Amino acid sequence: MRNNRLHTPDGVSDFLGGECERKRAAERAIAGVFAAYGYREAQSPTFEYFDVYGSGGTADERVFRFIDRDGAVLALRPDMTPACLRIAATRYAAADAPFRLSYIAETFRRGEDYHGKRREITQAGAELIGATGESAFAEMITVSVESLISAGLTDFRLDMGSARFFRALLAELGLDGERGRELQSYILSGDFVAAGNLTESIDAPSGPKQLMRSLPLFIGGSEALERAAALVTGSEAMAALAALSETKRRVDLYGMGKYVGFDLSMIGALDYYTGIIWNAYAPGAAAAVLFGGQYDGLSARFGANYPAVGFAINVNTLLDSLGAAPSVADVLLVAADADCADEAILAAKELRRGGARAQLSLIGWGAEKNADYARRQGLRGLVYIRPGLAEVTDFAAGTRETKKTRVENGKWTII
């Protein structure tokens, strides 16, 4: 029988040493981008009333629920966006819109199959609530790109699609209700053969039918939008394509256009997204590193009527894309001969004052013993104190230097 005291549940994990440092460094870099664009940090409770997240749909099954002592149904937050909309609706006046909020928080999701899937996910995201249009979209996409770059990711692509365009295309095909939802489910699952068969079976104009059958081919630069525009007939579909094009033009003004393209097969969940949507992908990641979009109707749940657009970075997936964490910590071990114990304390203090990370050895004297310990701990090097001397060993560089030292008025210095 497995001893659960020694294991973590499926879908969660520990972070240690270099993994923690890399994660925190990425989060700090992303938070710096949010702040530079004026997005103010928001923190919501780890658990709230289920009503904040539950909608009565199948997605509710992903929410961890439990009962409070007074019988209220509570939930661990599966996503930060509803919490941000609740904050905007209850803490701000409508006349002060738009609101720029950001967060870095743990989210929790359950599912039927946990194999390879996380149930605790760190999300870093931003929400622009109370603003809409191409300027708002371009700002959010630019913040998306700059956030990934700041965290150290340079090999990625961000694709834009449009739920608005897909709805317009369904209307041109005369597909609404159950058949429209069926076609949507095929495309969301990637079954474009079934989507093509359904499209072929209906009586509709040839251009929209051709476009729907071959949606995965409408990916790339502006030429993808031009080819799509040649096949649609309705003004709403044309307006959706024009919004995508104009958003990209404004992203170009920010200097981030080289990372951004189009993918008209990206349609999102139509009961959530109302307009532009985007995902970012990177090598080494099994899923999107970042996902975002426009969700104008969601604030109605909280008694407000705000347009909104936002995105979230899956920090765990981002770290997968960045590769292995450094195995060596940038920390020096400070040790000493038996008669230099006090000097080692002063030396470690001065090293920290100078900006280095230094930990004092607690395993006793002996240079080789301390060097072996520092290597096993994955530390950068060893500073070993002898009377009037310091032996400085850098394990990564493979160097060892001996420097003269002195202690005057309680201060340790290298001569």
Image (spheres, rainbow, N blue to C red):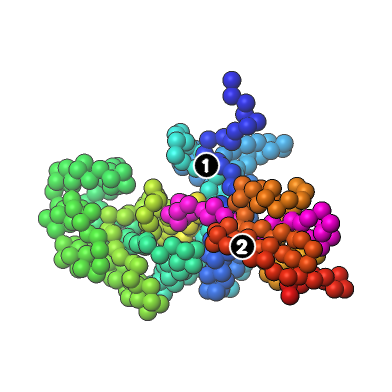
Q: Label 2: which residue?
A: 400
Residue that appears at 50% across and 42% down: 118
- Picture coordinates of residue 114 (x, y %)? 47, 36
Assess whether residue 341 is covered by the magenta stretch.
Answer: yes
Say which label, 1 or 2, has the lower sequence index.
1
Give the Cα distance between marks 1 and 2. Answer: 46 Å
- Residue 405 in view (yes/no): yes
Q: Quadrant of residue 136?
A: bottom left
Q: Secondary structure at mark 2?
A: strand
Crowding near the residue tagged with mark 1, few <14, some 14–19, many ≥20 C-alpha atoms within 10 Å: many
Residue that appears at 60% across and 33% down: 7
Q: Are marks 1 and 2 in contact (CB under 8 Å)?
A: no
Q: Which residues are magenta?
A: 317-344
The quadrant the C terminus occupies is bottom right
Q: Secondary structure at mark 1?
A: loop
Side (left or right) of 73 relative to 325: right
Instruction: Give the camera-side residue of 228 and 253.
Output: 253
For residue 51, above or below residue 208: above
Q: Label 1: which residue?
A: 119
For residue 115, above or below residue 394: above
- Picture coordinates of residue 297 (x, y %)? 45, 58
The quadrant the N terminus occupies is top right
